[in-house]
Image (cartoon, rainbow, N blue to C red):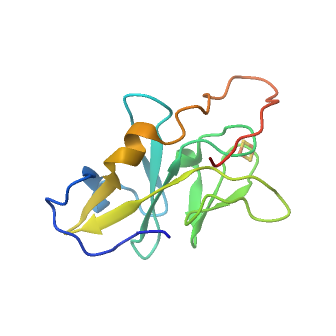
Amino acid sequence: MHRENLPMTPAAPGWTAVCAVDDIPPLGARRVARPQGMPVAVFRTADDRVFALLDRCPHKGGPLSQGIVHGDAVACPLHNWTIALVDGNARAPDEGCTPAFACRVHDGQVWLDAQELATKALDLPAPVAGPCRQQASCA
Ligand code: FES
């Protein structure tokens, strides 16, 4: 279940404040670096909903944070796949998914699950230039 925009207290254990909603450009994203693993892209929709995905397109690893948000999806800047913000799934006819991260908003502040930031999708390699032969997974 996606936990976007649920009520919480700022001191809720297990959550990390990463930025203000206003720090994210409307219809754009902000990258959140992690100690290990690829960064997380935090997206803002036109109606100020906030979602978080690994900043890695399931196609060939494009930087989703540089894509344009439309509705509740983002268009990858490399080959224009459309990725759903709620679960990271590519829209048909494309296939694949990028890991989604739990995300909450309280008093204009964006919070991500600290455990997920520390452990989720650490095994997915950063993309390299040239043809990619690896299939990303959402594990
Ligand atoms: S890398 Fe994202 S559409 Fe190709």
Q: Nearer the viewer, residue 13 or 26?
A: 13
Q: Residue 25: x percent and y percent?
A: 40, 57
Instruction: Name the residue at the left extreme.
Output: 11
Res 104 visible: yes
Relative placement, left or right, of 29 versus 83 is left
Task: Identify the residue shown where x is 74% and y is 38%.
Answer: 60
Q: Residue 15: image x %, image y %?
A: 27, 53
Which of the 4 quarters of the picture holds residue 11? bottom left
Front in this rendered view, residue 93 or 120: 120
Picture quadrant of residue 72? bottom right
Lateral position of residue 72 relative to residue 61, left or right: left
Residue 133 drawn above or below residue 85: above
The single residue placed furthest to the right in the displayed view is: 93
Count of labels in the image: 0
Q: Is residue 99 above or below residue 136?
A: below
Q: Quadrant of ligand 1?
A: top right
Q: Residue at x 34, y 53 (%)?
A: 112
Left or right, 115 with reference to 82: left
Front one among 96 and 79: 96
Q: Is residue 32 visible?
A: no
Residue at image point 43% right, 28% down: 36
Q: Is 66 left or right of 119, judged from the image as shown?
A: right
Residue at 75% across / 52% down in the picture?
Answer: 96
Q: Where is residue 106? Give x, y as percent.
A: 23, 68
